[in-house]
Amino acid sequence: MPALAIPARRREDGQYLFRHFLKDFSIAVRASDILEITVSPTPPAPGLSLTFSISTASYTPVITTNRQWCGGIDFASTVVGPVTVNVYNGPIIPANLVATQVLNFIAVPGPVDLANSYLTVIQNPANADGVSQDIVEAVLYDQYGNAEPSGTPITFSIESGTASMTASGVSSGNVATAYFTSTVVGSVQVQG
């Protein structure tokens, strides 16, 4: 699944620089948003403790940075809407605040995004006997990298070459499949 990477943001606490990466706009109840903090320059000893305060949660996880000086959380929400996450270098006191990020949970995926979706060839080449099949799948995601639901309409077309096509026209999960047969030897260009 493609992950939507928001450009890293920086915040300094006077000693270290904190950059964060996230996967945002996940489907509430179904998927997790991700917030990862990278600390630089490398602290002198491993294991810096970062405390995550999540506005909709009753817990405050403390994550110890790994060897790459990263610490992060994946978390889900049962509620659609924004969630504010404050990250502290140590205990939760205002002077220790190093990052604030608003993450968002949405109810359903957005429309299919061509930049995140793709076609893949499952079976190729097939004999040109009118029976053997080439198989192509379209894997569908929205602009945030969320998988599209079953029943999402898709149209496959033959752009060049000679073949017969069979396709349901809708996805099963976030995948739609098309089957191609031909009695003519040669390439077929497919669009979905």
Image (tube, helix red, strand yellow):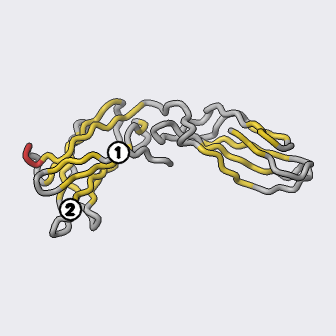
Mark 2 residue element? loop
Residue at figure coordinates x 20%, y 45% from the top left: 99
On residue 97, the disc is none
Q: Is residue 60 visible?
A: no
Secondary element under disc 1, as helix, strand or loop, is loop
Q: Is residue 183 visible?
A: yes
- The image quarter containing residue 4 is top left
Residue that badge 2 annotates: 41
Decide which of 102, 168 is in the foreground and name it. Answer: 102
Q: Position of residue 133 (x, y in %)?
A: 82, 50
Q: Name which quarter of the figure residue 158 lies in.
A: top right
User: Which one is nearer the viewer's eye here, 40 or 125?
Assistant: 40
Residue holding disc 1:
7
Amino acid type, label 1 = Pro
State left or right for residue 180 relative to residue 139: right
Please state the horizontal and vertical placement of residue 62, each as a whole percent of the image.
20, 54
Residue 160 lies in what quarter of the image?
top right
From this view, report whether residue 8 is shown above or below residue 158: below
Badge 1: few (under 14), some or many (20 or more) residues near its Cα, within 10 Å? few
The residue positioned 42% from the left and 43% from the top of the image is 31
Give x and y (percent) for residue 163: 85, 43
Whether residue 20 is situated above or below residue 39 in the rendered picture: above
Q: Earlier in the sequence, mark 1 or mark 2?
A: 1
| 2 relative to 88 in the view: left or right | right
In the foreground, 183 or 78? 183
